[in-house]
Image (spheres, rainbow, N blue to C red):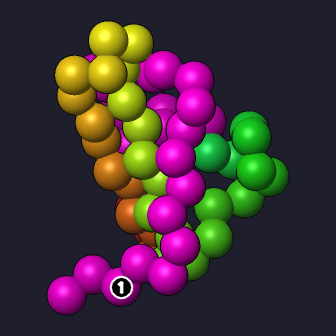
């Protein structure tokens, strides 16, 4: 089971082809750091696809 305490929704569209490292860099750029047990939800420009990035305290 994956524990998610909080879920953050990105308001700017991202390229869904981006890997977890690139999305994590975006999280760090916006928030300063990724928090443990938080989920970050990204969508593409047309809002037809989503990607969830979960940080568990050790990695994504």
Which residue is drawn at the image coordinates 74% and 40% (left, top)? 30
In this view, the residue in front, 56 or 6, is 6
Quarter of the figure with residue 42: top left
The quarter of the image holding the N terminus is bottom left
Residue drawn at x 53%, y 73% is 6
Residue 56 seen from this side: yes
Query: Horizontal and vertical percent for residue 26?
Result: 61, 36
The residue under the point 50% across, 82% down is 5
Q: Give the range drawn in magenta.
A: 1-26
Left/right placement of residue 51 relative to residue 36 reads left
Residue 24 lies left or right of residue 31; in this view the side is left
Left or right, 29 with respect to 15, comes to right
Q: Where is residue 23 in the image (x, y as percent from the top left)?
A: 48, 38
* 6 versus 20 height, above or below: below
Classify mark 1: residues with Cα within 10 Å, few (<14), some (14-19) or many (20+).
few
Residue 58 shows in the view: no
Give the vertical position of 54 relative to 32 (above or below).
below
Task: Give the labeled residue for mark 1.
Answer: 3
Image quadrant holding the C terminus, namely bottom left
């Amino acid at each position: 089971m994956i524990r998610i305490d909080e879920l953050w929704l990105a308001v700017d569209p991202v390229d869904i082809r981006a890997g977890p490292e690139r999305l994590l860099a975006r999280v760090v750029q916006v928030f300063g750091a990724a928090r443990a047990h938080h989920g970050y939800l990204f969508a593409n420009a047309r809002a037809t696809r989503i990607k969830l990035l979960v940080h568990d305290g050790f990695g994504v």
